[in-house]
Amino acid sequence: MGVQNTPPKQGEFQIITKTKDLVKHTFAMTSEKRYPKKYRALTERLYDRTLEIFECISEANELDLFDAREYVERQRLQKRALTLCKTVLFLIELSQERRCIGIESCQHWTKYVLDVKYMTAKWTKQERDRRKA
């Protein structure tokens, strides 16, 4: 079961679109059909962490790169998003180990997270390089 990739809205930052796809996929993957009630804490963490990734990226994107204080906050939010991606990857791995999802689903879901993680890391590096120039 997959979520169709959302085409970016005109002018929407591509990483935001990818993050929305991750959130939608997470909600689709964590149905009660896959996760027994005893794993409710796991599904809630998956929901919360993916939504927080979206919030961090969205908020960071709203901050002014050229305002020193906002730039520092922007970097903090980008780092937080990266940390959350690592947490979600672990929770997906745990889901597979607990046999809530199969290996193929684990790999597919992991790709959604890695897309967001790598795009966030690239975004962070590009901004750091731009500030140094």
Image: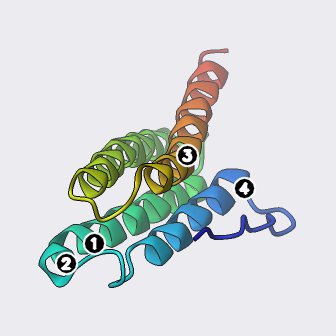
Dots 2, 1 in contact, CB < 8 A: yes
Mark 2 lies on a secondary structure that is helix
Dot placed on the residue nearer the N-terminal end, 3 or 2: 2
Q: Position of residue 99 (x, y in %)?
A: 27, 59
Structural distance between the alpha carbons of marks 1 and 4: 28 Å
Q: Amino acid at mark 4?
A: Phe
Label 3, label 2: how many angstroms apart (C-alpha)? Answer: 23 Å
Kindly identify which residue carries mark 3.
111
Q: Identify which residue is drawn at 42% across, 49% down.
A: 103
Amino acid type assigned to the residue bearing label 1 in the image = Thr
- In space, the residues marked 2 and 1 are separated at their CA atoms by 5 Å
Residue type, mark 3 in image: Lys
| Foreground tag (1 vs 4) | 1
Q: Quadrant of residue 83?
A: top left
Quadrant holding the N terminus:
bottom right
Query: Quadrant where the C terminus lies?
Result: top right
In the picture, residue 100 is in which quadrant?
bottom left
